[in-house]
Image (spheres, rainbow, N blue to C red):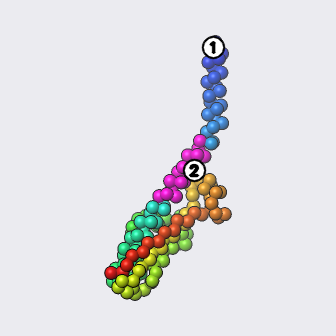
Amino acid sequence: MGMEGRGSRGQSVVELALLMPFLLWILAGAVDFGRVYYYDIVVINAARSGARAAADIRKSDPQVLSAVQADAGTVFNDPDYPDDHLVITVSPSGDRELGSTVTVKVTYRFTPITPILGAIFPPDGVLTASRSASMVAF
């Protein structure tokens, strides 16, 4: 009877060692999916903030761009990403007329922490969150 108790304890350790890589893989995937959702929400809010700023015909395009970056906080200012990871377009750019529709599109490219999502998505492993928001200029 004493032998059965000791053997089952060793069996549990072996089972845990065999399952641990799969459990960590699932955890890492959940973290990356959370990051995808987070960046998507940040991009949506930044596009809305940019459209709100662009709807004011007194504001210039640089002021609209700074409104987008201010709304996102430090998310868009990550030094680990190249300069092309964030693209902000204002349409129409320049002077806007009263009553015209203004659209701000924000595109953010980021690399997942783990290669799990990179293997599922595009060949370069970079995910893109892109959203636009429109308002009538006032």
Q: Residue at x 62, y 60 (%)?
A: 121
Q: Is residue 63 visible?
A: no
Q: Where is mark 1, residue-wise?
A: 2
| Location of residue 99 in the rendering, given as x and y in whole percent from the top left corner | 36, 83
- Residue range highlighted in magenta: 23-38
Q: How many marks?
A: 2
Disc assigned to residue 29? 2
Q: Residue at x 66, y 63 (%)?
A: 123
Q: Tag 1, which secondary structure? A: helix
Q: Going by the image, does 83 lie left or right of 93? A: right
Looking at the image, residue 112 lies above or below residue 103: above
Q: Residue at x 44, y 66 (%)?
A: 44
Q: Residue at x 37, y 87 (%)?
A: 97
| Location of residue 6 in the rendering, given as x and y in whole percent from the top left corner | 63, 19
Disc assigned to residue 56? none
Is 7 a magenta residue?
A: no
User: Sequence-wise, which precedes: disc 2 or disc 1?
Assistant: 1
